[in-house]
Image (tube, rainbow, N blue to C red):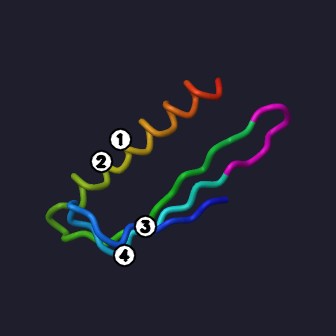
Amino acid sequence: TYTYSILESPMPVENYLSTVTVIPEGRKARLDWSCTFDVPAETETEMVGMMNGVYQAGVDALKKTFGG
């Protein structure tokens, strides 16, 4: 498990906290990557979509590097 926060960002997010957990499943593993953050209500949908894209790109890069 790895937890990190972003203290300063050009994105309109505050109180960002993210956790990545690798859960063994036999010869494979499952990755759980979650976060919480505060954003102005008018940008919430956009920011959630953007974060999902960032996480998917990260997972795709891990799969490419380590297989899966």
Residue placed under numbered mark 1 in the picture: 53
| Residue type for callout 1 | Gly
Q: Is residue 6 left or right of residue 9?
A: right
Q: Are marks 2 and 3 in contact (CB under 8 Å)?
A: no
Q: Secondary structure at mark 1?
A: helix
Place residue 44 in its image quadrant.
Answer: bottom left
Residue 53 position in % (x across, y down) = 35, 41
User: Residues in magenta?
Assistant: 22-28
Select label 4 or label 2 by which is in front.
Answer: 4
Residue at image mark 2: 49
Q: Do residues under tags 1 and 4 come within 8 Å of each other at their CB atoms?
A: no
**What residue is rendered at 38% in x and 67% in y?**
6
Q: Which residue is mark 4?
A: 15
| SS class, disc 2 | helix
Sequence-wise first label, 3 or 4: 4
Tell me the element at label 4.
Answer: strand
Q: Is residue 48 magenta?
A: no
Q: Residues within 10 Å of mark 1 (few under 14, many from 20)?
A: few
When the figure is inspected, residue 33 is found, relative to residue 2, above or below; the finding is: above
Q: Residues within 10 Å of mark 3 (few under 14, many from 20)?
A: few
Residue at position x 65%, y 54% in the image: 21
CB under 8 Å between callouts 3 and 4? yes
Q: Position of residue 65 (x, y in %)?
A: 58, 27
- The CA span between labels 1 and 3 is 15 Å
